[in-house]
Amino acid sequence: MENIPYPSVTVIDNHAYVSIIDCIAHLLFFSSIFTYAKKHPSDSVDAMHIMDSRKVQQIKDQAASIYGDVNVVVLYLTEWSDDFDPSMSTKANRQSCWIKTVSVMSGNVEDNMNNISTTFPIAIGKIGNSHEMVEQQFADELRKLRSGTCAFFNKSTASAVPVYVELLASLQDQPEQQSVNCLMLGGGKYSARWGYSLNIAEVHNNTPACSQCLLQMKQNGPKFLFNYT
């Protein structure tokens, strides 16, 4: 029993936290659905499943560049985080919490999986607390899982196998995404536009238009500025 991998709960900056490395070790030990990564057919152009997507194929290629010809189990993660109110919470005494979950998926279409059985709540804390230390811990563990140094016992092969893990998607609603990226709910002077860090209000009048917009303004006049979508 001592060698069976069970995720343990630790405390990081007032958050309950479970290591994603422990979760993957636990999942591979008890589940027989995770097989070695299969190469995507080079002549296939239609993506019928998320496992056929270009991003998943890039993850497989990255794993191959690290492990070479060695058989490797390639997994990808989707993370989700948001706030919620416990069932016993009331409007007069709200005890809002924050939670982060991670779903583990195989890169092979043949590995049929149930998202519920492969989804782990890895962190929970109070809504008013900073979650940066939890996010940093998760990023550090993900970096290790990408390093080519991780191997776990896999029930599917009944042996220890090299494992490569990559984050495929981060799912958050707009307030959560803005909070994670320190965008001040989109109302800050330096975060009014995604991808730019400057006070746009001070420079927008002198910012050159792109070639397409400039051509439209020349052809259609000032009305283009109000009709363009």
Image (spheres, rainbow, N blue to C red):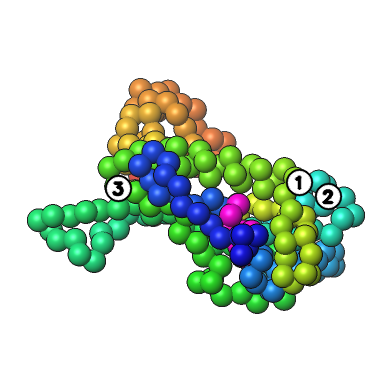
Disc nearer the start of the sequence (2/1): 2
Cα separation, mark 2 vs mark 1, equals 7 Å
- Residue furthest to the right in view is 69
Disc nearer the start of the sequence (2/3): 2
Q: Which of 119 and 202 is in front in this view?
A: 119
Could you tell me residue 79's position as x and y percent?
A: 51, 55
Q: In which quarter of the image is residue 54?
A: bottom right
**Drawn side of residue 215 relative to residue 184, left or right:** right
Q: Which secondary structure lies at badge 1?
A: loop
CB of mark 3 within 8 Å of CB of mark 1?
no
Q: Which secondary structure lies at badge 3?
A: strand
Q: Nearer the viewer, residue 180 or 96?
A: 96
Q: Which secondary structure lies at badge 2?
A: helix
According to the image, label 3 marks what residue? 126
According to the image, label 1 marks what residue? 148
Specify the segment rendered in magenta.
21-27
- The kind of residue on which mark 1 rests is Gly
